[in-house]
Image (spheres, helix red, strand yellow):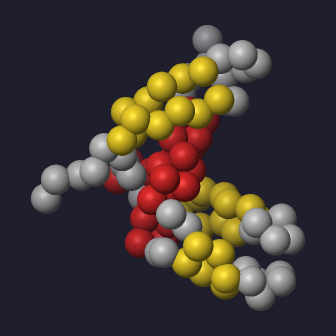
């Protein structure tokens, strides 16, 4: 099985003005890591393991009942952010 790899740009976790370009896939190393995503309607946080985010296409927000669609690009950004948070700080 080949994994889909895409270049993803993420600005943030490493400080102001720092732009990191990552070659990122939906890493199995994050399968058991709790990831968090905000509802686009009400802002409530949905927290689930990486395996859950890897496998879903959409979910229903527990707070507002809205259907949240999670695209592959959004998943890449979510996983990239989680990977950056795991990097050792200098």
Res. 76 visible in picture: yes
Query: Looking at the image, is 23 positioned above or below residue 35?
Result: above
| Residue 72, quarter of picture | bottom left
Is residue 60 left or right of 42 when viewed as pictured? left
Query: Looking at the image, is 62 positioned above or below residue 29?
Result: below
In x, y percent, where is residue 78?
56, 50
Q: Identify the residue at the far bottom of this view.
A: 65
Res. 44 visible in picture: no
Rendered residue at 65%/17% (across/down): 18
In x, y percent, where is residue 58?
55, 78
Is residue 84 left or right of 13 when viewed as pictured? left
| Residue 55, quarter of picture | bottom left
Depth check, front residue: 16 or 82: 16
In x, y percent, where is residue 28?
34, 53
Rendered residue at 66%/22% (across/down): 14
* Total marks in image: 0
Is residue 70 left or right of 46 when viewed as pictured? left
In x, y percent, where is residue 1?
13, 59
Rendered residue at 67%/82% (across/down): 67
Is residue 62 left or right of 82 when viewed as pictured? right
Q: Identify the residue at the far top of this view.
A: 90
Which quadrant of the figure contains the C terminus?
top right
Depth check, front residue: 74 or 14: 74
């Amino acid at each position: 099985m080949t994994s889909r790899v895409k270049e993803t740009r993420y600005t943030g976790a490493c400080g102001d003005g720092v732009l990191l370009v990552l070659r990122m896939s939906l890493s199995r190393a994050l399968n058991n890591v709790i990831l968090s995503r905000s509802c686009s309607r009400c802002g409530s946080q949905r927290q689930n393991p990486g395996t859950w985010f890897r496998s879903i296409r959409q979910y229903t927000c527990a707070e507002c009942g809205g259907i949240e669609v999670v695209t592959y690009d959004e998943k890449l950004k979510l996983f990239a952010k989680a990977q950056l948070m795991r990097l050792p700080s200098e």
